[in-house]
Amino acid sequence: MVESLPTTFSDSVHIAVIGGTGLQSLEGFIPIATINPLTPWGYPSAPIHILSHNNTPIAFLSRHGTHHELAPHEIPNRANIAALRSMGVRTIIAFSAVGSLREEIKPRDFVVPDQVIDRTKGVRPFTFFEKGVVGHVGFADPFDERIAKVVRECGHALEGEGIVLHDKGTIICMEGPAFSTRAESHMYRSWGGSVINMSALPEAKLAREAEMVYQMICMATDYDCWHSTADVDVEMVMGHMHANGQNAKRLVGAVLDALNMRWSTIDSIRRRKNKPELANAQQHQIWRGRTYHFAWSISACYFSSE
């Protein structure tokens, strides 16, 4: 008989992993609890798994639902971000399967994007600011360079073990669920697009509004339809997804170890300087630049800059 996990978790969890297509679970991590927070925007895509990695709790959320039952336009992005934020999460590492728009980005390669072009159509709720709550956030650099640097270091360290990682790139985020026409695919290439997916937005924008550090890691499964010789079939794509999923689990473990090492070093320095109030500060503050207070109520949120 399998013992059921607790459905509550009292400690703060500072890091979350959002898994996309091909990464719907994180086997090998120790399960601690499974929680399903109700937010003003409903429940998240799936119950959130609290896992332990080297004695550090992390949250894992399957973006498309437990059984991949949610299409990109059906994902409750606001509930997902709100649920993670309510648990104390300040850093999100998000994985996404993508189509490649560049010859050099081959299927099974990883990309650490630094930019995104929004080709969604406003079908998805895309902001927390509404109903009298007015706010604007900067989004010139949609991803976090500090987290990206850690991901790059870890990815390159694993290159001898089957991981190929590209240091930067531009995501085209399309509405879906249909894929691009060939003309659109060529247009996106002419714009400088590197990869294409349906998941980066509004997820990244909502994370920014919620004062959370966010970095996506893209996993190429195929060339988009611009490619004249790379035929795509389901069996091939599924094979790439499986390989990407296994590599992603190794990569995320390495990234979490690297982040924990940095946080431990900073805490040690602060303690040596006899600044316990800093040493005991929540780990997420290391990654914060300009800060905002994000307050939740039954029906609304607000931001006020410090």
Image (tube, rainbow, N blue to C red):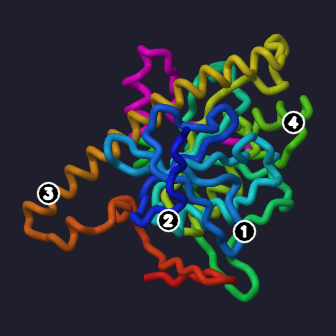
- Asked whether, in this view, residue 11 is left or right of residue 99, the answer is left
Q: CA distance from mark 1 to mark 2?
A: 15 Å
Q: Secondary structure at mark 1?
A: loop
Mark on residue 179? 4
Start and end of the magenta stretch?
Answer: 150-172
Locate residue 139, reporting x and y percent.
60, 62
User: Mark 3 near mark 1, Cβ–Cβ under 8 Å?
Assistant: no
How crowded pointer 2 is (Cα within 10 Å; few <14, some 14-19, many 20+) is rated as some
Mark on residue 65? none
Locate residue 256, reporting x and y percent.
39, 42
Locate residue 130, reporting x and y percent.
74, 80
Mark 3, mark 2: which one is toward the viewer? Answer: 2
Extreme residue in the top direction: 229
Mark 2, mark 4: which one is toward the viewer? Answer: 2
Mark on residue 42? 1
Mark toward the start of the polypeptide (4 vs 3): 4
Q: Secondary structure at mark 4?
A: loop
User: Mark 1 near mark 2, Cβ–Cβ under 8 Å?
Assistant: no
Q: What residue is shown at x 57% (from left), y 45% (from top)?
A: 94
Where is mark 2, residue-wise? 87
How crowded pointer 1 is (Cα within 10 Å; few <14, some 14-19, many 20+) is rated as some
User: Mark 3 near mark 2, Cβ–Cβ under 8 Å?
Assistant: no
How crowded pointer 3 is (Cα within 10 Å; few <14, some 14-19, many 20+) is rated as some
How crowded pointer 4 is (Cα within 10 Å; few <14, some 14-19, many 20+) is rated as some
Mark toward the start of the polypeptide (1 vs 2): 1
Q: CA distance from mark 4 to mark 1?
A: 28 Å
Q: What residue is shown at x 12% (from left), y 62% (from top)?
A: 271
Where is mark 3, residue-wise? 269
Mark toward the start of the polypeptide (2 vs 4): 2
From the viewer's perspective, is residue 207 above or below residue 238? below
Mark toward the start of the polypeptide (3 vs 1): 1
Mark 3, mark 1: which one is toward the viewer? Answer: 1
